[in-house]
Image (cartoon, rainbow, N blue to C red):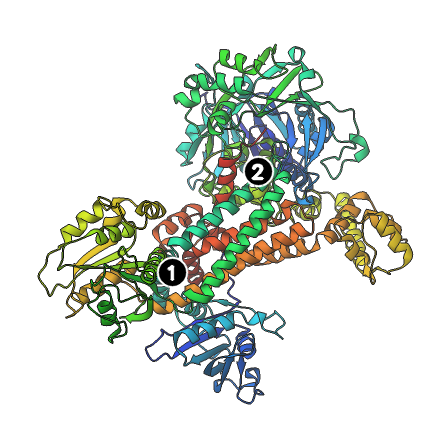
């Protein structure tokens, strides 16, 4: 559904720069009031709503509990002499990307601050929405607007691809699963309302109640995972794997530009999982280095290996370091099986030494990953089942290139492949990620709220025709996260699941 | 075709006298326009060639809306029903649905009588073979098979399932309309010649069985409601408390399904003899057995066709199987062991249109003056047909009279949903109304259809002053009583406590308004009468409305808010003259869809499959520039 032009909107409006300074822009009738909720002047007295137009104010952004998020400069600009011709507030943050995200989050949730009367609501801006408003409010002319339209279109396409590429793997599966369960229950309700002599939903209610609390729990978990981990250190979750001493830590150091992990010649020295946020030419990688995957009897190292396997499951991208100076062994076979169906880049490291293992050897191993899996500690089959992937997939998703972590050769090509894999070389990542993520979180919250309403209706002994709408609202919100529309889903589900019509 | 000869002059020509045609013709004639109603046979006027009931989930809503707009269906069924039930009574008021079993012959002859008595209306038994247009493709008349040219200012096509109709079961394939009525084999060519896009749909009907050969003791008897609630807001409830006729319920079983499965290759559906697209609702019994193979039994309702006939309608077992398979499968059903078939079940294929060619008022976009309604528009069902017929009829009349079109949006009525779906969405099967299609259904109840639509019927000219005044009075009574109930405060006195306990509720801690008490799940407006000594004496329908509006206030308010949002984009109209080729940055798919469908508002555009939010933004921005 088309969003209202009269809402107050907010977004990070500048790309996050290396210096960590960025701007959050709020626009719309409640812009100043919303900023006032989250802003405090040093003396605590000054209200932005009293401020003269086009003035700048120093102060702090607070969270709901009263804690300081960031030290900021706030510009207050009143309609119509602003970019959008609406009341506009710009918050200049200093605290880097995490603080910006938190400030945006605070603004988007200002209605839940103590003392706010819930009437001030700010939603996340759609891609290109500021410019759209600027045009509609007569700030820019048609020729400029037409250029903007192209941009909106491009951004929308990008946002869709972005949301799809970002929300994949376990999160995508979870949301899809949730949706199909919700759709089934909703269609059961609708079918029984349409053909009451044939179908009755009432006996199904206890089961439905169970489902409902299950769904809410799942969404709650998803939301907290956004808050704790994913949002706090946003980026492409990347795991570096390779057999012991293949050069994983050296690669990480190359990325970091400094020595942080212990690099030795003794196999198995990396026991803990190191996680680093690395910015490679505008792409944020959240890199986890793993203990070398190999059979081991050392208890401490075993734990490290298990952790590594877990990290692998959650990874968006796998970097497999192959030691090209020695032949492939059973450790590589095991890794190849873990890699199947995943998005990965294989680096044939130590290209500075004499090549023993080449690309074809690795391809052969990927095509037949289980030729020798006896004696392995983990069962490759179970992992394979979880990520059941075709050979096609393997070929499409995995790139292989010679590399040297020592002298940096192959590095530029690696960056190109990385960009290609994630953006088809088109657009930068950082500023959009934050917005889409804030939107995702809001959508999860919306879905949860809708399900909460279903519970309230059940509590009030309302029949299912009252809450069927809320059920579909939750379905729609979840669909937006993974880029799917509702369309005729409900009608199709009714007909495919239930035999209708007397 | 016959030699050009006679010329006749009317205002409106309605082609087809089924449920759509009857409503369209009555509406036009009642608005004072000279109207001719063409029918292949006067015996088939308002015929019910399939099931013998009117109403049911969401369809009952349509019938009441037809009544509120000044249509005929509700009044006709109120006088000719055999049994009536309110479905979904245990659910919320929005899904309560009235359904009546009809005496088919009585319904048909009553409607015919109504048409005959209507001023400005003539019935003509003749096949229309051509539509006639001027150089600018404006409709100027229709031609009949005898060559007579009927000049008219508007025509409404309501051809139902008659165009190039073929009835099929097994190897039998006869080119007739329903009930062996003569098919209309010429008009399609003329329509195609005028650039109209034709689809081919299919539907089916079960066998009729001689009631004397049915053993009802092996079935479950189902009686009607007492008291009966009439469909029409104008019918006096005391007039419909008649002696009702029962319906019987039985089931198919494994044996039925085995016979069907073993003979699937003989079904024209599966052998490819039938090419039209059938509905997913009400599938044939062989379709059910294939698609829901895990179900061991399907419900079968045995329903009377009329008081003066023994024929029973076998609801739930429509089929196009060969005769021997039909005889065997019906006889596996408990109670039908010795059944004799009177009429074979059959499938029927017919020509209809892609309704995306229609404007919001049901007029063909490229043939001004030509309107269409009913099954011809790709729908299914008597009620859907009648609703469209009334809508198209009124709009044809409005056009001739130079008045604003009747417009009903998705938040105002099921008719609005029906119209919008038909003209906006790709329709790949006969469209059936369903409650899940109405996103604002908590507001679109059968109980308040008059409150929602009487005003529009009055403005169109189909609701007379008397009825309109009664409507205004009812509205005022409801408003005043809701206000009063919100202001009455009940104290936590002993008497109130005792009464609330008796009524299965809990005593008050402090005081509460009467409205607050009504909202308790276990209480309602009527139950609280003893605590409300000053309550005025009000008609039942007013009390019901007050109760619903107060009891479900929270839900209703929320939906009204959603409607407000919906209206915003609905009110952003798109000029008819907009050339989508000049709008930059639209994606090709969206551009094509918008050009084909030509939505009348941004809201409607946003509902078109293949038009995404980015396209809508582009359109909004462009329109802003276009106006200034």
Number of residues whose C-alpha sits closer than 10 Å to that of mark 2, classed few (under 14), some (14–19) or many (20 or more): many
Question: A209 or B88, which lies in front?
Answer: A209
- Residue B120, image x and y in percent? 65, 33
Marks 2 and 1 sit apart, C-alpha to C-alpha, by 35 Å
Find residue B384 and name its label: none
Which residue is identified by label 1? A159
- Looking at the image, how many numbered discs can be counted on the residues? 2
Q: Is residue A107 above or below residue A188?
A: below
For the C terminus of chain A, give its image quadrant.
top right
Q: Is residue B393 above or below residue B302?
A: below
- Residue A136, image x and y in percent? 46, 68
- SS for dot 2: helix
Residues at marks 2 and 1 on the same chain: yes
- Residue A223, image x and y in percent? 49, 61
Mark 1 belongs to chain: A
Mark 2 belongs to chain: A
Q: Is residue B515 visible?
A: yes
Extreme bottom residue here? A43
Number of residues whose C-alpha sits closer than 10 Å to that of mark 1, classed few (under 14), some (14–19) or many (20 or more): many
Q: Is residue A115 left or right of residue A322?
A: right
Q: Is residue B402 visible?
A: no
Q: Is residue B197 left or right of residue A467?
A: left
Residue drawn at point x = 83 percent, y = 47 percent: B503
- SS for dot 1: helix
Find residue A191 and name its label: 2
Of the residues under marks 2 and 1, which one precedes in the sequence? 1
Question: B117 or B608, which lies in front?
Answer: B608
Q: Is residue B250 left or right of residue A436?
A: right
- Residue A210, image x and y in percent? 58, 47
Within the image, what quadrant is residue B382 found in?
top right
């Amino acid at each position: 559904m088309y969003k209202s032009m009269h809402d107050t909107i907010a977004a990070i409006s500048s790309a996050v720069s290396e210096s960590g300074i960025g701007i959050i822009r709020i626009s719309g009738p409640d812009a100043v009031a919303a900023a006032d909720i989250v802003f405090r002047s040093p003396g605590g007295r000054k209200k932005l709503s009293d401020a003269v137009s086009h003035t700048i104010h120093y102060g702090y952004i607070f969270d709901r509990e009263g804690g300081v998020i960031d030290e900021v400069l706030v510009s207050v600009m009143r309609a119509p002499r602003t970019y959008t011709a609406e009341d506009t507030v710009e918050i200049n943050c200093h605290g880097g990307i995490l603080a910006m995200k938190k400030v945006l989050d605070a603004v988007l949730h200002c209605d839940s601050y103590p003392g706010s009367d819930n009437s001030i609501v700010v939603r996340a801006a759609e891609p290109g929405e500021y410019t759209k408003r600027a045009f509609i409010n007569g700030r820019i002319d048609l020729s400029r607007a037409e250029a903007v339209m192209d941009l909106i279109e491009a951004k929308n396409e990008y946002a869709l691809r972005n949301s799809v590429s970002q929300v994949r793997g376990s999160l995508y599966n979870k949301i899809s699963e949730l949706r199909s369960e919700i759709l089934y229950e909703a269609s059961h309700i609708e079918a029984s309302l349409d053909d009451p002599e044939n179908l009755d939903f009432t006996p199904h209610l206890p089961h439905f109640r169970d489902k409902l609390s299950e769904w809410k729990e799942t969404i709650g978990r998803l939301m907290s995972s956004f808050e704790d981990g994913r949002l706090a250190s946003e980026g492409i979750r990347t795991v570096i794997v390779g057999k012991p001493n293949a050069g994983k830590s050296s690669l990480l150091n190359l990325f970091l530009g400094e020595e942080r992990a212990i690099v030795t010649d003794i196999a198995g020295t990396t026991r803990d999982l190191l996680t680093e946020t690395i910015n490679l030419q505008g792409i944020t990688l959240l890199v986890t280095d793993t203990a070398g995957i190999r059979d081991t009897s050392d208890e401490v190292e075993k734990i490290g290996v298990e952790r590594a396997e877990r990290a692998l499951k959650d990874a968006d991208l796998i970097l497999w370091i192959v030691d090209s100076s020695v032949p492939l062994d059973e450790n590589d076979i095991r890794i190849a099986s873990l890699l199947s169906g995943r998005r990965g880049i294989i680096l044939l490291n130590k290209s500075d030494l004499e090549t023993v293992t080449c690309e074809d050897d690795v391809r052969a191993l990927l095509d037949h990953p289980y030729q020798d899996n006896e004696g392995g500690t983990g069962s490759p089959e179970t992992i394979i089942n979880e990520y059941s992937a075709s050979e096609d997939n393997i070929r499409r998703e995995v790139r292989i290139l010679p590399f040297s972590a020592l002298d940096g050769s192959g590095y530029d090509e690696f960056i190109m492949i990385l960009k290609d894999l994630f953006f088809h070389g088109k657009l930068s990542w950082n500023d959009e990620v934050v917005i889409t993520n804030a939107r995702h979180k809001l959508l999860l919250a919306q879905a949860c709220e809708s399900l909460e309403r279903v519970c309230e209706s059940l509590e009030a002994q309302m029949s299912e025709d009252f809450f069927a709408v809320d059920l579909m609202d939750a379905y729609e919100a979840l669909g937006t996260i993974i880029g799917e529309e509702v369309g005729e889903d409900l009608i199709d589900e009714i007909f495919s699941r239930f035999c209708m019509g007397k | 075709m016959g030699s050009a000869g006679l010329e006749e002059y009317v205002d409106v020509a309605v082609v087809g006298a089924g449920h759509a045609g009857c409503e369209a013709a009555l509406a036009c004639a009642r608005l004072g326009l000279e109207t001719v109603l063409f029918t292949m046979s006067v015996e088939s006027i308002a015929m019910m060639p399939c099931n013998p009931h009117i109403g049911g989930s969401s369809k009952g809503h349509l019938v009441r809306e037809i009544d509120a707009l000044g249509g005929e269906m509700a009044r006709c069924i109120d006088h000719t029903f055999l049994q009536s039930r309110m479905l979904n009574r245990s659910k919320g008021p929005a899904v309560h649905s009235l359904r009546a079993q009809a005496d088919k012959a009585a319904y048909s002859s009553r409607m015919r009588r109504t048409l005959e008595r209507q001023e400005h209306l003539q019935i003509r038994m003749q096949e229309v073979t051509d539509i006639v247009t001027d150089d600018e493709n404006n409709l100027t008349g229709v031609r009949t098979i005898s060559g007579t040219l009927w000049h008219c200012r508007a025509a409404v096509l309501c051809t139902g399932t008659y165009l190039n109709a073929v009835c099929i079961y097994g190897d039998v394939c006869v080119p007739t309309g329903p009930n062996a009525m003569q098919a209309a084999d010429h008009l399609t060519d003329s329509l195609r010649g005028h650039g109209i896009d034709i689809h081919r749909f299919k539907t089916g009907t079960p066998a009729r069985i001689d009631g004397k050969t049915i053993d009802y003791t092996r079935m479950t008897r189902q009686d009607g409601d007492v008291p009966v609630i009439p469909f029409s807001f104008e019918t006096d409830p005391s007039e419909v408390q008649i002696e009702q006729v029962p319906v019987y319920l039985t089931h198919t079983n494994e044996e039925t399904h085995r016979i069907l499965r073993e003979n699937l290759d003989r079904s024209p559906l599966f052998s490819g003899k039938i090419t039209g697209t059938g509905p997913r609702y009400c599938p044939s019994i062989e379709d059910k057995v294939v698609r829901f193979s895990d179900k061991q039994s399907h419900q079968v309702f045995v329903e009377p066709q009329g008081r003066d006939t023994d024929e029973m309608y076998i609801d739930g077992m429509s089929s196009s199987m060969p005769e021997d398979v039909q005889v065997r499968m019906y006889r596996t059903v408990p109670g039908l062991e010795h059944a004799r078939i009177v009429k074979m079940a059959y499938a029927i294929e017919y020509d209809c249109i892609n309704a995306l060619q229609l404007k919001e008022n049901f007029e063909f976009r490229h043939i001004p003056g030509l309107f269409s309604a009913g099954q011809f528009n790709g729908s299914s069902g008597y009620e859907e047909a009648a609703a469209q017929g009334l809508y198209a009829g009124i709009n044809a009349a409005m056009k001739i009279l130079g008045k604003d079109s009747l417009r009903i949006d998705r938040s105002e009525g099921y008719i609005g949903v029906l119209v919008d779906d038909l003209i906006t969405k790709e329709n790949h099967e006969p469209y059936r109304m369903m409650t899940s299609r109405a996103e604002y259904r908590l507001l679109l109840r059968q109980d308040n259809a008059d409150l929602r639509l009487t005003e529009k019927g009055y403005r169109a000219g189909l609701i007379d002053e008397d009825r309109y005044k009664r409507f205004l009075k009812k509205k005022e009574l409801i408003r005043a009583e809701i206000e009063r109930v919100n202001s009455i405060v009940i104290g936590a006195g002993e008497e109130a406590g005792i009464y609330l306990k008796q009524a299965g509720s809990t005593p008050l801690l402090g005081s509460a308004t009467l409205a607050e008490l009504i909202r308790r799940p276990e209480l309602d407006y009527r139950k609280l009468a003893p605590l409300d000594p000053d309550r005025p004496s009000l008609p039942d329908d007013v009390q019901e409305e007050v109760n619903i509006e107060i009891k479900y206030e929270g839900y209703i308010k929320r939906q009204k808010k959603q409607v407000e949002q919906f209206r915003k984009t609905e009110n952003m109209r798109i000029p008819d003259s907009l050339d989508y080729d000049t709008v930059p940055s639209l994606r090709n798919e969206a551009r094509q869809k918008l050009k084909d469908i030509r939505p009348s508002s941004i809201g409607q555009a946003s509902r078109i499959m293949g038009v995404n939010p980015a396209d809508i933004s582009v359109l909004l921005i462009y329109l802003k520039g276009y106006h200034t």
